[in-house]
Image (tube, helix red, strand yellow):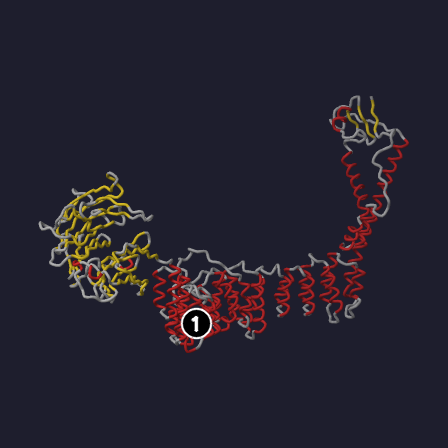
Amino acid sequence: MEGQIWFLPRSLQLSSFQAYKLRVTHLYQLKQHSILVSVGEDEEGINPLVKVWNLEKRDGGNPLCTRIFPAIPGNKPTVVSCLTVHENLNFMAIGFADGSVVLTKGDITRDRHSKTQILHEGSYPVTGLAFRQAGKTTHLFVVTTENIQSYMLSVKDYPHLELDTHGCGLRCSSLSDPSQDLQFIVAGNECVYLYQPDERGPCFAFEGQKLIVHWYRGYLVIVSKDRKTSPKSEFAGNEAQNSDKQVLNIYDLCNKFIAYSSIFDDIVDVLAEWGSLYVLTRDGKIHVLQEKDTQTKLEARKSMLFRKNLFEMAINLAKSHHLDSDGLSEIFRQYGDHLYNKGNHDGAIQQYIRTIGKLEPSYVIRKFLDAQRIHNLTAYLQTLHLQSLANADHTTLLLNCYTKLKDSSKLEEFIKTSESEVRFDVETAIKVLRQAGYYSHAVYLAEKHAHHEWYLKIQLEDIKNYQEALRYIGKLPFDQAETNMKRYGKILMHHVPNETTELLKILCTDYQPSGDNEGPGMLEGKKANSEEFIPVFANNSRELKAFLEHMTEVQADSPQGVFDTLLELRLQNWAHEQDEQIKEKLHNEALTLLKSGRFKTVFDKALVLCQMHNFKDGVLYLYEQGKLFQQIMHYHMQNEQYKKVIEVCELYGDQEACLWEQALGYFARKEEDCKEYIAAVLKHIENKNLMPPLLVVQTLAHNSTATLSVIKDYLVNKLQKQSRQIEQDEQRIQKYREETTRIRQEIEELKASPKIFQKTKCSICTSALELPSVHFLCGHSFHQHCFESYSESDSECPTCMPENRKVMDMIRAQEQKRDLHDQFQHQLKCSNDGFSVVADYFGRGVFNKLTLITDLPSGKAAATIEA
């Protein structure tokens, strides 16, 4: 059975093949390849052979041996002590009992692609070898019974470094995994040392004679003697110690605790496969050690560590097993509670800080609300804000902590974060700072984060820096500047009237924020409604006048309220001014404004303003513009300006004739001697025939000073005109009567006597009249063909028809107007001579019933036709 290599699969069914004729001394199975490297002997003596097996390929049912070469350093055969192979199959190192190390470089599975050389020579047996690959750098650790060396294989000539002057026994060295930074582990009798390629690392004091060392999944596995015995050479064999108990310890170096410890009888080796550890003892038994699942291990170990208050170790354990954040947070909380109960508040708050995002902040805040621990609470709240998990209440509490601690530097550091790093509610911070009296900090926050309302409120109500508030408004966009001027305009006008007025002028004409860097004309400015800012100027009439005058000058289309208010201001100033020159100037300004044509739509309002301030010229101008001529005359009558009354009648009498009548009545009521004015009025009434004489006499009868001589000339002229009119009317009547008599005689003749037609020419073509012809009683005759061509009716004379139609139209019109009572009443009321209107309607037959015959009865034709 010697020289065989045995395979033990997971089913535990053994199989083997003959690898050597005599014995097998060393095996090395690569983890990432199906390659097995063995060292054994085929003949007696010291003649070790290295064989490389490919387990995936078969040769007669056995694994394929791809390479065989002797393991001899130089020309002197010696015993092989240890073997290691690099996972990339490019390096293989063999250690010998004489202290030599042979390095094979290249493809170890083929003879032609590899090169073998002696890397190390010494006087002490080689007890351990290990390759370390970090990036592109390859190192080889070589340990003997007396020293430890490191070779750099990725550099030519393989430079080496001696790491320590003590070594270890066979199977007492191993290479850790990346969790321990691929350190080389060397187990001495007193301590376990860890090495980097260039220095020695940490040391662990594990006592006892070490027999076997392995590294498994982050654990250090050490088999040592249960009791101390006299040290013996590892190469002399272990027969003398076979009866001794051996201890198997599994250490967790990261968390610094023993994960497993047990006593076995005579351990041959510890193997790692299929996720478990297998302990092979000399009695032929295999013991399997299975690692518990992570959660079970953690619960068991945590509960034990919590009972011993070993929270740091519990945290490290949880981290090494990648416990989720909820689990870690619970450990931090318990650790914090433990430290808090012990009175270590600084340490406790550090643990509570590590729970942020998982533990409710109020749990921690309640513990540290005492004033003596306010600095701990501040640290917790700071971290809460840094992680953007704070709400408005947390911000309020943190700022209150700063203010109570009077820690201005921390306060400034907190609020002066960049725009993208703000981790608190800005408005809440501003409120708290303002309440605590930190106005400059509150203003800084408000300006930085564009809380315009808060900025202005603090500047105006707390700091009372009105100039700065006004400057800030001038930098805002139009909509916000307009809103804030409406809100704070009165306060600013009270304290800085001139500057506020200037800003309002800009805001209502062509506003651009003062902070804009655009050149003039680059952006079209916006305009506010100037009328809306008039209330801002309460109790500042001088500034209001300047503002309104500016607006009317630069904006002809300003709202009507601007002109109304400006007129009122000018009238007030005019009414209260004592200096005559200034009063005259103000008078002209007010009148000019009235004449600007801006008060047509608000005529009544302007008139009321002028009447309230007794602005005579303005009142008269508005009366004139409104065609209120009677009011103009009444105004002069009230002021007893007789000449002005006459002037008004002369100017506007043609447009409103009743002015003369009212003037006559006014002078008639006066007891003073007004003969001159009465005569002038009577003259005009006579010329225009505005009043009946009887009415004139009745009107003047009320004046005791007006004698008959005043109206003598008027009455004589009037009677003479009426006498001449009567004569003319009688002559016209006589003429109409004679004409009527003549027409009646003609009608009778036509009825009783035959009509002789003596016309020799056609009335249309003026040619000699020929038969057939057409004759009418009016005396006109026509050729029949001319008559048919030009006549529109068989019964009407073409020549007389236009005149007849006019008469007929007049009759029809009179008939239609008989019922137009409203029109008759209106004409009668508006006419200067009512009798003429009545006579006209009598003449039209409005007051008698008229029967109009448009067609003659059949058989009585108005014309005869001669053939």
Residue at horizontal 83%, vertical 36%? 854
Depth check: give the residue in front, 539 or 643: 539
In the figure, residue 164 lies in which quadrant? bottom left
Q: Position of residue 540 (x, y in %)?
A: 53, 71
User: Which residue is denoted by mark 1 in the rendering?
Assistant: 399
Relative to 303, is 159 above or below? above
Amino acid on which the number 1 mark rests in the picture: Leu
Q: Residue furthest bottom?
A: 372
Q: Position of residue 824 (x, y in %)?
A: 79, 51
**Left or right position of 249 against 726:** left
Q: Residue furthest right?
A: 752
Mark 1: give few (<14), some (14-19) or many (20+) Cα within 10 Å: many
Depth check: give the residue in front, 3 or 467: 3
Mark 1 lies on a secondary structure that is helix
Q: Position of residue 189 (x, y in %)?
A: 21, 65
**Left or right position of 278 against 581:** left
In the figure, residue 576 lies in which quadrant? bottom right
Is any part of residue 554 visible from this angle?
A: yes
Depth check: give the residue in front, 683 or 188: 188
Report how many numbered discs are placed on residues in the image.
Answer: 1
Q: Position of residue 805 (x, y in %)?
A: 78, 37
Depth check: give the residue in front, 148 or 795: 148
Residue at horizontal 24%, vertical 46%? 35
In the figure, residue 280 lies in which quadrant? bottom left
**Left or right position of 235 against 403:** left
Q: Quadrant of the C terminus?
A: top right
Is any part of residue 499 visible from this angle?
A: no
